[in-house]
Image (spheres, rainbow, N blue to C red):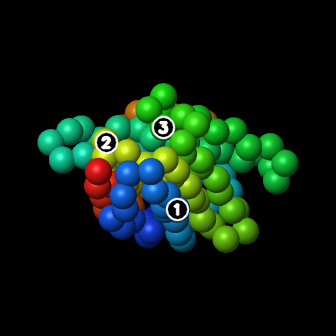
Amino acid sequence: QVQLVESGGEAVQTGGSLRLSCAASGGTFSSYSMGWFRQAPGKEREFVAAVRSWNPTVTYTHYADSVKGRFTISRDNAKNAVYLQMNSLKPEDTAVYYCAAKSGSVATSEVDYMYWGQGTQVTVSS
């Protein structure tokens, strides 16, 4: 069983930056693909980014088109943590951001992820 706890969400202005963190416990963190999803009010939860590391020198990342070039996902297996650096934030990035974990390769569908955090709120004002 893996427990995930997100942090770092807050209110920022358009163009600002935030760094979300997700702390994992209870499993072999390095073996999991980690993903970030978000859910805006009245909308379905959507994929944001995912990362997998096969070894300390090989990392694979995948991004939603809407965040490509603005967001960066990274992980620190020694700290059992995954991060989402968000730059050039827009009002449409306002959502609750969730961290998720799955075995095997990265995926963009939420149904493929086994473990979820409780979410952290990001609000971007214009």
Q: Position of residue 60 (x, y in %)?
A: 69, 38
Is residue 57 left or right of 31 when viewed as pictured? Answer: right
Q: Amino acid at mark 1?
A: Arg
Is the C-beta separation of discs 2 and 3 under 8 Å? Answer: no
The residue sitting at 82% across, 53% down in the picture is 56
Looking at the image, which is closer to me, 106 or 73?
73
Is residue 50 left or right of 37 when viewed as pictured? Answer: right
Q: Earlier in the sequence, mark 2 or mark 3?
A: 3
Q: Residue furthest right?
A: 57
The residue sitting at 84% across, 48% down in the picture is 57
Whole-angstrom CA distance, mark 3 to mark 1, is: 14 Å
Looking at the image, which is closer to me, 119 or 41?
41
Q: Amino acid at mark 2?
A: Glu
The residue tagged with tag 2: helix, strand or loop? Answer: helix
Q: Position of residue 50 (x, y in %)?
A: 55, 42
Can you tell which mark lies on residue 92?
A: 2
Is the C-beta separation of discs 2 and 1 under 8 Å? Answer: no
Q: Is residue 15 above or below residue 83?
A: above
* Residue wearing tag 1: 19
Q: Position of residue 98 (x, y in %)?
A: 39, 54
Q: Is residue 64 above or below residue 20?
A: above
Is residue 12 left or right of 44 when viewed as pictured? Answer: right
Residue 2 appears in the rendering? no
Can you tell which mark lies on residue 67?
A: 3
Q: Residues within 10 Å of mark 1 (few under 14, many from 20)?
A: some
Whole-angstrom CA distance, mark 2 to mark 3, is: 11 Å
The residue tagged with tag 3: helix, strand or loop? Answer: loop
Q: Position of residue 70 (x, y in %)?
A: 54, 42
Q: Is residue 34 above or below residue 67?
A: below
Q: Amino acid at mark 3?
A: Val
Looking at the image, which is closer to me, 106 or 12?
12
Q: Is residue 3 above or below residue 100?
A: below
